[in-house]
Amino acid sequence: MGWTVRDIPDLKGRTAVVTGANSGLGYVTARELARRGARVVLACRSQDRGQTALERLFDEVPEARAELRLLDLADLASVRAFAVEWGARRLDLLINNAGLMAVPYARTADGFEMQFGVNHLGHFALTGLLLDRLLASPGARVVTVSSLLHLLANLDMHDLNSQRKYGRWVAYGRSKTANLLFTHELARRLRGRHVVAAAVHPGYAESGLHTRGARLAGSRFQERVARAGTRLFAAPPEAGATPSLYAATAPGVAPDSFTGPSVLGARTPRGGPGGSWRAPWTRNDAAATRLWHASEELTGVRWQV
């Protein structure tokens, strides 16, 4: 029997931020961290959906120490406000979970292609703005949720915002490649420090991501297909969240590791999470450094590591 959520250690005294914690994998991640005693902040874009999730969490874990804070990763002003409001509070675990998948072309408040802006740039800025709090907490971790669908596309460093040509699945793959390159470079920069940067993927797990793209594209047929596929083949969110929980809490998690579920999409997975294969381009030092510098220029967030 492999690692399970029952192996999460006592987290009393530790504080976690989980982005996109109002539903799906993010909600399960926040709930299980709270169940083990962590103080959990649900960082959500919607006040209403976030409040509903918070109330549900208290129903399921009455002893939880949890709160809601608004965070819109598609708006760097919101990201900066979140960090300012955080102030000097302790931060041990940052779970960069929120994301969009295969949505029609749109731009963030700052003019970035939406998937690249939310999935990568928003989390890049958030992590950088909270880095001093992570560095102040021994054993802190940054866990970024990528996807096996990073295999769909490498980055085009000359067209990060898909201005020349946009394909929603290619853009998604690029944003997930960016997550892995970000983790690779962050782990390199944190070498010798006590903060571990790791990446995960959930496999094929139940999530609103699968239907949202089709719905926003106005295709009821694609939405029905996505809904049926999720119902028939996807693992429950509890299974999909396990790699995030493992990377955030298990002993010996290696910097720049890429953890996935034991069986992709298994509704009753056997064995615990483990190392997952990733495309060679996600370990390219030069590409990771170029993306890092480009991200600093685009967001205005310049790191001190």
Image (tube, rainbow, N blue to C red):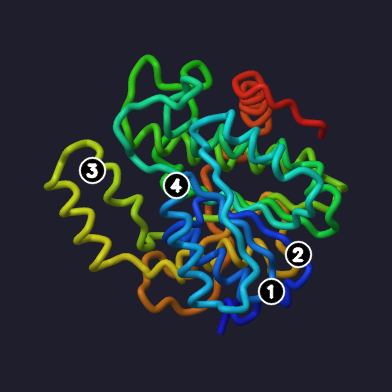
Mark 4 and mark 3 lie on one chain; the one further toward the N terminus is 4
How far apart marks 4 and 3 lie (CA) works out to 21 Å
Residue 180, quarter of picture = top right
Q: Are marks 1 and 2 in contact (CB under 8 Å)?
A: yes
Disc 4 residue type (three-letter): Ser
Residue name at image x 28 percent, y 66 percent: 233
Q: Which residue in the protein does label 2 denote? A: 14
Where's the N terminus, which quadrant?
bottom right
| Camera-nearest residue between 243 and 212 | 212
Give the image location of residue 9, x and y in percent: 71, 76
Q: Nearer the viewer, mark 1 or mark 3?
A: 1
Q: Which of marks 3 and 2 precedes in the sequence?
A: 2
Up/down of 192 relative to 104, above or below: below
- Rendered residue at 37%/71% (across/down): 266
Q: Are marks 2 and 3 in contact (CB under 8 Å)?
A: no
Where is mark 3, residue-wise? 214
Q: Secondary structure at mark 1?
A: loop
Give the mark nearer the N terminus: 4 vs 2.
Answer: 2
Viewer-nearest of discs 4 and 3:
4
Q: Provide the residue designation for mark 1.
A: 37
The secondary element bearing badge 4 is classed as: loop
Question: Disc 4 vs disc 2: which is toward the camera?
Answer: 4
Q: Which mark is residue 283?
A: none
The residue furthest left is: 221
Q: Residue at x 22, y 36 (%)?
A: 217
Q: How busy is the neighbourhood of tag 4: few (under 14 within 10 Å), some, or many (20 plus)?
A: some
Q: CA distance from mark 2 to mark 3?
A: 39 Å
Q: Position of 213 compared to 57: left or right?
A: left
Residue 281 in view here: no
Q: Amino acid at mark 2?
A: Arg
In the displayed structure, 227 sits above or below 177; it is below
